Image (cartoon, rainbow, N blue to C red):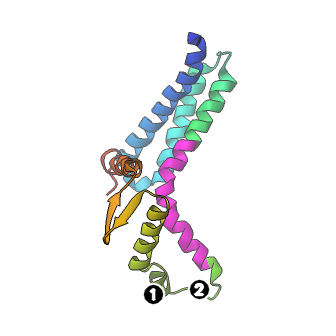
C-alpha cells in the first residue's frame, strides 16, 4: 500500500517542474527575442529557487532535488530537440568540409525531395505509416498525437510559428 508521504515525494518535484514550465513559457512570451534557451534556463533556476525556499527543511530535500533536476533535464531536451536537429547537422557538415561550404553547397545538402524521402522511409520502417497504391496512411496514430502535441506547444503556448 502506498503511503501518502511517499506519494508526495514524487508529486512535489512535479509541482516545481510545473512552476519551471510556467515561468519559462511566460518569460518566452514576454521576451521572445531573448531566445528559447535563455527562457528554459530562467524557468529552471526560478523553479529551483522556489524549490529550495519551500523545501529547505524537508527531510526529502536531496531526493526531491534529484527528481526535480532529472525532470527539468528531460523538459529541457523535450523543448530543445526540434530546435537543434538541423543546426547540429549544418555544423557537422561545416566541420566535415574544411574548405568551407558556400550557401549553395549547404542548400544542396538539404534537397527538399531527399529530406522528404528520408523521412518517409523512416516512418515506413518504423511502421508508423504504410504505403498502399502510392498513397500513405497512418498506421500508429501515436506519432501523430505526439506531433500534434509538439505543434500545439510551439504554436499555442510558446507562440512560435
Figure quadrant of the N terminus: top right
Residue 58, picture quadrant: top right
Residue 51 % position (x, y): 57, 26
Residue 90 % position (x, y): 54, 73
Q: Is residue 7 left or right of residue 118?
A: right
* Figure check: 46 above or below 52: below
Residue at (69, 25) in percent of width and height: 62
* Figure check: 9 above or below 75: above
Residue at (60, 73) in percent of width and height: 92
Q: Crowdedness of circle 1 by 10 Å Cα count: few (<14), some, many (20+)?
A: few
Asked if residue 53 lies in the magenta stretch, the reply is no
Q: Residue beneath label 2, please?
A: 100
Figure quadrant of the C terminus: bottom left
Q: Is residue 19 left or right of residue 68?
A: left
Asked if residue 87 lies in the magenta stretch, the reply is yes
Residue at (56, 67) in percent of width and height: 88
Over which residues does the magenta segment extend?
Answer: 74-94
Main SS category, magenta section: helix
Q: Residue beneath label 1, please?
A: 104
Looking at the image, the residue that sits furthest to the front is 133
Looking at the rendered structure, which numbered label has been put on residue 95? Answer: none
Amino acid at each position: 500500500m502506498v503511503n501518502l508521504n511517499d506519494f508526495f515525494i514524487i508529486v512535489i518535484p512535479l509541482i516545481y517542474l510545473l512552476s519551471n514550465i510556467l515561468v519559462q513559457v511566460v518569460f518566452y512570451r514576454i521576451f521572445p527575442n531573448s531566445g528559447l534557451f535563455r527562457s528554459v534556463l530562467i524557468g529552471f533556476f526560478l523553479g529551483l529557487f522556489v524549490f529550495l525556499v519551500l523545501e529547505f527543511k524537508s527531510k526529502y530535500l536531496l531526493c526531491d532535488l534529484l527528481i526535480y533536476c532529472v525532470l527539468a533535464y528531460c523538459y529541457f531536451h523535450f523543448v530543445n530537440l526540434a530546435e537543434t536537429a538541423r543546426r547540429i547537422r549544418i555544423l557537422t557538415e561545416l566541420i566535415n568540409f574544411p574548405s568551407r561550404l558556400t550557401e549553395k553547397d549547404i542548400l544542396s545538402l538539404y534537397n527538399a525531395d531527399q529530406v522528404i524521402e528520408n523521412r518517409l522511409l523512416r516512418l515506413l520502417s518504423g511502421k508508423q505509416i504504410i504505403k498502399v497504391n502510392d498513397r500513405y496512411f497512418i498506421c500508429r496514430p501515436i506519432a501523430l498525437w505526439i506531433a500534434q502535441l509538439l505543434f500545439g506547444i510551439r504554436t499555442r503556448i510558446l507562440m512560435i510559428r
